[in-house]
Amino acid sequence: MDNIESKVPETVSYYDHQEQLAREERHTNRWRIFAWVLFASLIISNFAWILYESSYQDVVVTENTQDGEGTNIIGGGDINYGAEAKDN
């Protein structure tokens, strides 16, 4: 019976318990701040990358025409597909 009673843990004082809770709260707040900083840096870096890439974007207009003989000319003569079929 002596062995069982000696294994009972001592009670933790209220002061020690509150101190541990305060430590955990500070630790949790640090992780929250870290997560928000990571999230903000992700958003900012993506926005900066979009701005950077949009400055180099070229707009190309391709005109599809057909000459008088039924030949398809695409892009001002870059591609010539030949005459269309007669049944079209």
Image (cartoon, rainbow, N blue to C red):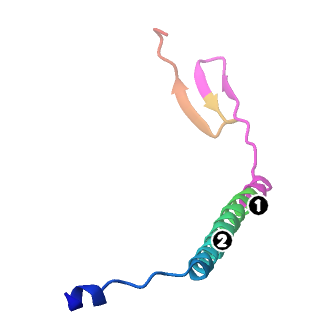
Q: Amino acid at mark 1?
A: Ala
Q: In the image, residue 46 lies at what x, y percent?
A: 69, 59
Q: Is residue 68 above or below residue 57?
A: above
Residue 15: in magenta span? no
Q: Tag 1, which secondary structure?
A: helix
Callout count: 2
Residue at 73% over, 55% down:
50
Residue 57: in magenta span? yes
Q: In the image, residue 70 lies at what x, y percent?
A: 59, 18
Q: Nearer the viewer, residue 43 or 48?
A: 43
Q: Is residue 43 above or below residue 2?
A: above
Residue at 70% over, 30% down:
63
- Specify whether 59 is left or right of 78: right
Q: In the image, residue 53 lies at what x, y percent?
A: 73, 57
Q: Magenta part of the protein: which range?
A: 49-72
* Tag in front: 1 or 2: 2
| Label 1 environment density (alpha carbons within 10 Å; few <14, some 14–19, many ≥20) | few
Farthest front residue in view: 1
Circle 1 sits on which residue? 48
Q: In the image, residue 49 lies at what x, y percent?
A: 72, 60
Circle 2 sits on which residue? 34
Q: CA distance from mark 1 to mark 2?
A: 21 Å
Q: Quadrant of the N terminus?
A: bottom left
Q: Nearer the viewer, residue 77 or 39?
A: 39
Q: Is residue 80 above or below residue 70?
A: below
- Specify whether 43 is left or right of 85: right
Q: Nearer the viewer, residue 48 or 88?
A: 48
Which comes before the other along the chain, label 1 or label 2? 2
